[in-house]
Amino acid sequence: MDNGKIFNRALNNISIEFAGRAAIRRMFDMEMTISDIRRELLYPLSEDVIKNEIWSYLLENRTVLLNEPDYSAGKRYDFIEETNEYGRKSFKRIEMVPSDHDIPEYIKTGFGVLKYKDPDGLSKRIMELALCDREYITELPWPLEYIWHKKNERIKRIYAALGE
């Protein structure tokens, strides 16, 4: 990679940090639309930059998974201290069994597939959604394959409105 590209990427990251990566993410969590987020920022950023930042946020906090969820990967371990009859302390590793509410549930979704295969059909189906939910489907860079989305209030609301 040449120095110009490296410099531009670094400058772009600084711009996003200055504009407030945390602010973008917070406003998105408040279900603001991308255009509303852009208007609220003190430092001007393009909508593409905001969309990419939101997509990165969804991937980082595991709201969206590109691969099927691996529930076995959620194993956690803890250590307990034991003392024997001579007073010697040792630690024992135990596996923590997650409760059902600790394991997030995911839905397989294909917004990217629908968006590019049948854009007119998708447009008709989402007309009844609120603007923030419509933009969630149409404006984010969904991949052209099925992905897994955490079953949160937003996706439940979208699927309920779509009748699925």
Image (cartoon, rainbow, N blue to C red):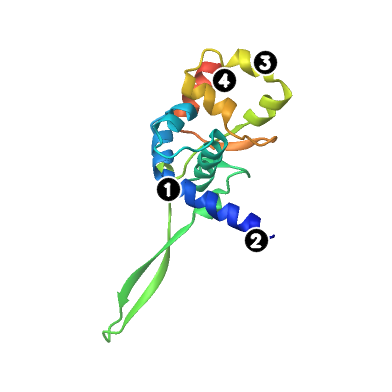
131, 112: nearer the viewer: 131
The reply to whether residue 138 is visible in this rendering is yes
Q: Quadrant of residue 100?
A: top left
The kind of residue on which mark 4 rests is Glu
Tell me whether the residue at label 4 lies in contact with that at label 3, contact meaning CB atoms closer than 8 angstroms. Answer: no
Q: Secondary structure at mark 4?
A: loop
Q: Considering only vertical position in the picture, is 71 above or below 40?
A: below
**Image coords of residue 96 (percent x, y):** 42, 58
Q: CA distance from mark 4 to mark 2?
A: 49 Å
**Disc on the earlier residue, 3 or 1:** 1
The kind of residue on which mark 2 rests is Asn
**Dot in front, 1 or 4:** 1
Query: Left of 27 or right of it: where is 49?
Result: right
* Tag 4 residue: 164
Q: Secondary structure at mark 2?
A: helix
Query: Left of 107 or right of it: where is 94?
Result: left
**Dot in front, 1 or 2:** 2
**Dot in front, 3 or 1:** 1
